[in-house]
Image (spheres, helix red, strand yellow):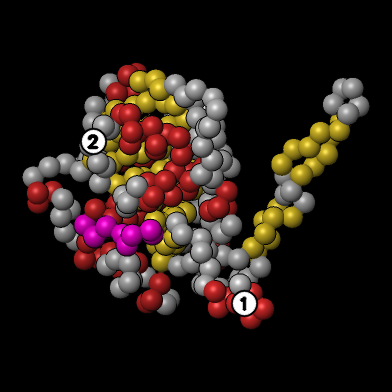
Amino acid sequence: MNGQNEIGLADNIMDMKKASDKAFSIKDSGRRPLILVSNDDGFRARGVHQLTRLLSEFADVVAVCPEGPQSGKSMAITVSDPLRLTRVTDYEADEPATEWYHVNGTPTDCVKMAMHTILRGRRPDLVCTGINHGSNAAINVVYSGTMGAAFEGCAFGIPSCGFSLCDHSADADFRPMMPYIRKVVEVMLSHGLPEGVCLNMNAPVGEVKGLRLTRSCRGHWSDEYKEYLDPAGHPFYMLSGEFINDEAEDADCDYSWLAKGYASLVPVILDPTAEKSALPDAYLEF
C-alpha cells in the first residue's frame, strides 16, 4: 500500500486524516455551509437523493437537477431552446434542509441557472454532483454530465466534486461509499481546492476497502455503436462498446484501484491547455 496514495497522507491537495478528525472550519464561523447539488441522471434518481440526505445533515442544500436523464452531456449548454425552472416541493417535506428544483436542460444549465436565478447572490461553499449511477473513471470524466456540472462549479471558483458509483442499477446501493463522500466533503469545506481544480470520486460496487488519491486511467472505448434495422428496414445505431484499459492492471490509476475494491479520488483541471513542450519542435515556429 503506497502511502503517497493514501488520502490521509496526501500533502499536495488535502490532509484527510486531520480534516476528518475535526469539525468543519466553516462551522466555527457560526453558520451552516451552503452546498449546491446537481446530477445528470435527473431529479428523480436515487443517487442524488442519497447525496442530498447526507449533505443536509450538516449543510443547507439547494438541489437543481435536470428533469430527465442527461448522461453524456459533459459541459453542454442549451443555446436556442427556452429553459424552464420548476420548484419540487414534494421532496422538501422529507428533506427540510434542501430546496429542490428541476430544469429542462443539461447539468451545466442547472448549475448556471442556480447561480444566476435561484441563489441570487448567495454563494455556495461547495458544488457536489451525483451520485452518478455508473462509473465516471478514466476517459469517462470528459463525457460525463455529472462531471460537467462539477467543472461548471469549478469555473465559478467554487470547490467542486463529482461522485459516482460503478453501478447503473436504478436501485443501486450507495451505502458503502457514503462515509467516504462525507470525508471528502469535510476536507473540501475545511481546506477548499486550488483554483481551477475539482475532484472526481468513483466507488466500486459493494464493500469499499478505502479511498485512494490517484490519477485517471488511460483507456478507450471499442465497438461503440451497434447497427439495428427498424421495421421499414432502415439501419439505426445505438451506443454500445467496451472500455479497454490501456495500462497495466497494477497501475496507480482510478480504474485499477476500483478493480481492487477501493474508491478513487482524482484531481482534475478545468484548463485543458497542454504544455508547448509536448509538441514536436516544428510547431514551436508558430
Q: Is residue 249 above or below residue 104?
A: below
Q: Residue 142, how many percent across, how many down?
A: 55, 52
The amino acid type, in three-letter code, at marker 2 is: Gly
Q: Is residue 40 above or below residue 23?
A: above
Q: Give the mark nearer the N terminus: 2 vs 1.
A: 2
Mark 1, other Cα within 10 Å: few <14 / some 14–19 / many ≥20? few
Q: Which mark is residue 285?
A: 1
| Quadrant of the image occupied by residue 118 | top left
- Residue 217 shown left or right of residue 102 in the figure: right
Q: Residue 235, how many percent across, how many down?
A: 86, 33
Q: Residue 154, how many percent across, how many down?
A: 37, 51
- Residue 194 shown left or right of residue 59 in the figure: right
Q: Residue 125, how many percent across, how many down?
A: 25, 46
Q: Residue at x 35, y 54 (%)?
A: 180
- Magenta segment's dominant SS is loop
Q: Residue at x 43, y 49 (%)?
A: 151
The amino acid type, in three-letter code, at marker 1 is: Glu
Quadrant the N terminus occupies: bottom left
- Residue 188 shown left or right of residue 239 in the figure: left
Q: Which residue is mark 2?
A: 121
Q: Magenta stretch?
A: 190-197
Q: Residue at x 37, y 77 (%)?
A: 3
Q: Residue at x 19, y 61 (%)?
A: 21
Q: Between residues 172 and 18, which one lies in front from this camera angle?
A: 18
